[in-house]
Amino acid sequence: MHAAEVDVESHAWLAASNMLKDADTIEHFRRSKIGLLAARTNPEVPRDSLRLINDWYNWLFAFDDAFCEGELMGHRASALARALPPLLEILDDRRKPDDDDPFGLALNELLHRIVSTSTPAQVDRWRITVKEYLFAQIWEAANREADLIPTPQDYILMRRITGATYTCFALIDAGGGYRLEAEEWHHPDVRMLSDLACDLIGWDNDLLSYAKECDNDKARHNLVTVLATHRNLTLQDALLEVSDMHNQALAAFLDRRAALEKWAPPPVRTYVRGLEHWVRGHIEFSLGSARYVHAWPEGTCWPQAV
C-alpha cells in the first residue's frame, strides 16, 4: 500500500544527497524504479523499515555508478583503494564525514538510522558485509585495469560479495522486526541457503543485465562472458550454461531448505522466506526497470512473473 509513496520519498532523498552528478542521472534513477526492488524484496516489512531499506538500495546503486563503473575510480584499483578509508571509518563511527563527501554523509546517516532500529549484533553484521562489498570493488577495478576476465572459480566466489546482496540480506531480520541469533546466522544450513540465494540473484542479474554491461566494460564481470571466455563457448551456449547452473542452484536451495525446516525456529524460517522474496523480487524488479530492459534490442519479449 505504501510502496509507491516510499519510493517517491526515497528518490527525493537521493536527489537531495548530491550523490548523483546531474539532472539526467537523477531522472535515470527515477525511471529505474529502485523502490520497486525494495518493495518486491521486502514485501512484509513496516513502512519505516521499507524506507530505510529503499534508501540503502539507492545508496548502493549510486555508489556503483559513481565509483565502480565510473572511469575515474572503476578502472583504477589504487584510486578506489585510496577512496575507501574514510568510508570505512564512517562505518565504524570513528569519524564524521566531510561536508563535501555526499556518499560519506549519506552512509553516516544510514548507519545511525540502522543503529536506532537494530541490535548491536545486527549492526555489526551489516557493517561487516558492507566492508566486504567495498573491498571487493578493488578486485573488480584491478580486473578492469589489467583488462582481465576472471576465471569461473574466482568469479563465482567474488560475485557473492561484489553484488552487495549480503549487505541487503543483513537487513532482512532487522527490517522485519525480529532477530537471528549469532549461532542461527552462522548455522551451515543458513549459510548455504544464503550463498545459494546470492548465486541465484547474481546469475539472474548477469542474464538480465548482459546487454547493459556489453556497452560498459565488455561485460567482463558477468557470468555469461566468464564462461564464454574460459570455456570457449558461443554466446548462446554460455547463456544456456548459466541457465543450467541456475536450475542446479535452485534445486540445491530447495533440498537445503527441506533440511533446515527439520530444526529451524520461526525466526530462521522467516529469514529464509526473506531470501525467497529476494530471489523472486529481484526478477520482478529487473523486468520492470529501465535500468536493464531498455538496454536490450527493441522488440525483445520478456516473460511475466507468475
Image (spheres, helix red, strand yellow):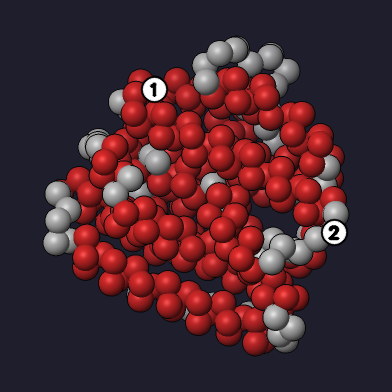
Question: 262 and 49: which one is in front?
Answer: 262
Q: Which mark is residue 130?
A: none
Q: Is residue 59 above or below residue 188?
A: above
The kind of secondary structure element at disc 1 is helix
Is residue 92 shown above or below 248?
A: above
- From the viewer's perspective, is 73 left or right of 134? right
Can I make out residue 281 in this image?
Answer: no
Camera sees residue 204: yes
Provide the residue designation for mark 2.
Answer: 147
Q: Secondary structure at mark 2?
A: loop
Residue located 85% across and 59% down the image: 147
The location of residue 303, given as percent across then percent down, is 48, 78
Q: Is residue 144 left or right of residue 44?
A: right
Question: Which residue is denoted by mark 1 in the rendering?
Answer: 115
Q: Quadrant of the C terminus?
A: bottom left
Q: Tell me the kind of residue under disc 2.
A: Asp
Q: Amino acid at mark 1?
A: Val
